[in-house]
Amino acid sequence: MKIKLACIGAIRDAEVEKLISQYTKKIPFYWPFSLVAIPDVRTPKSAGPAKQKELEGQKFMAEIVPGDFVVLLDERGKELTSRAFSEFIERKAVELPKSLVFLIGGPYGFSEEIYRRADSMLSLSKMTFPHELARLFFVEQLYRAGTIMRGEPYHHD
């Protein structure tokens, strides 16, 4: 199983980018991993959030192939502990023939097309975070899941 994280938007803070990079370099020790940063979608303000979500949705759909298991990182998703997230990843590694694809949306969330395509939704928190921090928190949790799975001394209950 491969894991892909697809995100809308660029990282503008060099320190956050450095931290994300540190974790993304460690994750392939546990699973094949790729991070796809989809450029920000620019729409005129008159187009509104629905149009922006639609255009972002088209870009997300280009990153998904039939057979992928798609998980939206969404505030309405299920909250998991780090250990439960590790167990989720471990189960999917056995069950899935293709990729496990996580999506972090833009400022307005996801298009209806993406919600329909999603197989699951997870929440990092009931709070809302900037996409840069959501990306950092997610890659750290993915790395943590790998260390939990292997019994390494990174996570403490």
Image: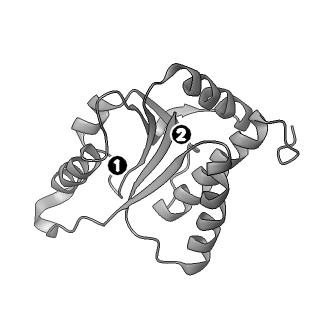
Which residue occupies the foreground of this view, 55 or 129? 55
The outermost residue toward the bottom is: 14
Q: Distance of mark 1 from mark 2, alpha carbons? A: 12 Å
On the image, which quarter does residue 136 sit in?
bottom right
Mark 2: which amino acid?
Answer: Ser
The answer to whether residue 107 is above or below residue 89 is: below
Q: Residue at x 31, y 40 (%)?
A: 64
Task: Report the residue marked by disc 2.
Answer: 123
| Image quarter in which the C terminus is found | top right
Q: Along the horizontal axis of the image, is 98 left or right of 136?
A: left
- Disc 1 vs disc 2: Cβ atoms closer than 8 Å? no
Q: Residue at x 28, y 38 (%)?
A: 114
- Picture disc at residue 147: none
Residue 63 coordinates in the image, percent (x, y):
31, 47
Task: Report the residue marked by disc 1.
Answer: 109
Q: Along the horizontal axis of the image, is 146 left or right of 41?
A: right
Which residue occupies the foreground of this view, 74 or 36? 36
Local secondary structure at mark 2:
strand
Residue 71 coordinates in the image, percent (x, y):
44, 35
Q: Residue at x 22, y 36 (%)?
A: 113
CA neighbours of label 1 inside 10 A, class few (<14), some (14 to 19), many (20+): many
CA neighbours of label 2 inside 10 A, class few (<14), some (14 to 19), many (20+): some
Residue 154 coordinates in the image, percent (x, y):
84, 48
Residue 2 coordinates in the image, percent (x, y):
50, 39
Local secondary structure at mark 1:
loop
